[in-house]
Amino acid sequence: MDLILPQLDLPVGRIPDPAPNGAERAKPVRGRPVHLSGYQREGQDFYATPAWVTEALLKRVRLRGPVWEPCCGDGAMARVLAEHGLDVVSTDIADRGFGEAGVDFLDCLTVPRGCRSIVTNPPYGDSGSHEGQSRSPTAMRKFLSHALMLTAQVDGQLALLVRLQWIAGRFVAEAMSAAPFSAVIVLTRRIRWFDMAEKTNHAQHHHAWVVFDHAHPPGQPPALLYG
Ligand SMILES: C[S@@+](CC[C@H](N)C(=O)[O-])C[C@H]1O[C@@H](n2cnc3c(N)ncnc32)[C@H](O)[C@@H]1O
C-alpha cells in the first residue's frame, strides 16, 4: 500500500478520456440494451457522498488509474477523484446530470477501455442512508461479484464504500476471504449523507472502504486502516 498521491491538475466535473489520443471516449462493453424504467432523477438509491469520505480513501490507497465510477450519481465521488489527479470515467444507470447516463453496471462485460480501478458507493441500501431505502443482500452480493469479475480482467483494484456492519455478514466473510481483499479503511467519523432532504438520516452507522486489489499477494491478509 502506497500513500503517494498523483498531482496532475485535471479540470473538475468533466469526464476525462483515458484514451491516449483523446479521439474516442472509453466506454464499458455492455451485454445487452439498457432499460431506464424505474430509475428517475430522484430515484431511491441516490445519495451523494461527502468529499471527505473519498479523500479518506485517497489518503490511504494509491489507486491505479484511470478509474471507473460506475454509479456516479451527481459526480460527488468522481469530482474528488479528478481533483486528486486521477482520470475518471463516470457512468450511471440514471441521468443525474453528470457523466454518461444509461449504463447499467451489471450489464457491462468489461471495464471502460484503459480503466484499471473501480471506485463507487453502491446502491442497494447498504449505506443505510435514508428511511424506506431497499436493502437487498442478494443485489449487493451480485454487485460485488460482478465488480470483482470486471476488475480481475485488468488485474485492477476495486474500492467500495459499505456500511461497516456489512463486512461481518457470513456471505461477505466468505467472499472477502476468497477475493484479493487488500485493505479495509474504517471511517471513524459517521457520514451525514447529502441530498436526501427530510429523509436524510442522522449519521447512525459507521462505514468503511473495502479495497480489493488483484495484484495483492495471495495469502497476505488485508490491512486494517483508519480514515
Ligand atoms: C448511492 S448512489 C451513489 C452516487 C455516487 N457514487 C456518490 O457516492 O455520490 C448510487 C447510484 O447508483 C446508481 N445505480 C443504481 N443501480 C445501478 C446500476 N445497475 N448501474 C449503474 N448505476 C446504478 C443510482 O442511479 C445512483 O446514482
Image: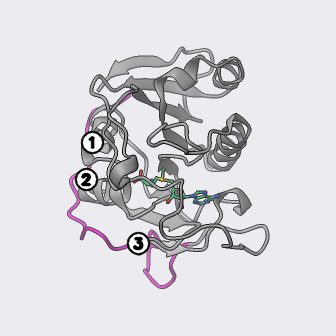
**Mark identifier at residue 84:** 2
The span picked out in magenta is 1-26
**Mark identifier at residue 140:** none
Which is more foreground, mark 3 or mark 2?
3
Residue occupying image coordinates x 60% and y 43%: 155
> Mark 1 vs ligand 1: CB under 8 Å?
no
Residue at the bottom extreme?
23
Q: Is residue 70 visible?
A: no
Q: Is residue 8 above or below residue 168?
A: below
Residue occupying image coordinates x 52% and y 41%: 157
Residue occupying image coordinates x 61% and y 44%: 134
Label 3 sits on a secondary structure element that is: loop
Label 1 sits on a secondary structure element that is: helix
- In the foreground, 125 or 132: 132
Q: Is residue 194 above or below residue 57?
A: below
Residue occupying image coordinates x 53% and y 56%: 44
Label 2 sits on a secondary structure element that is: loop
Query: Sequence-wise, which precedes: disc 3 or disc 2?
Result: 2
Give the residue type that dot 1 points to: Glu
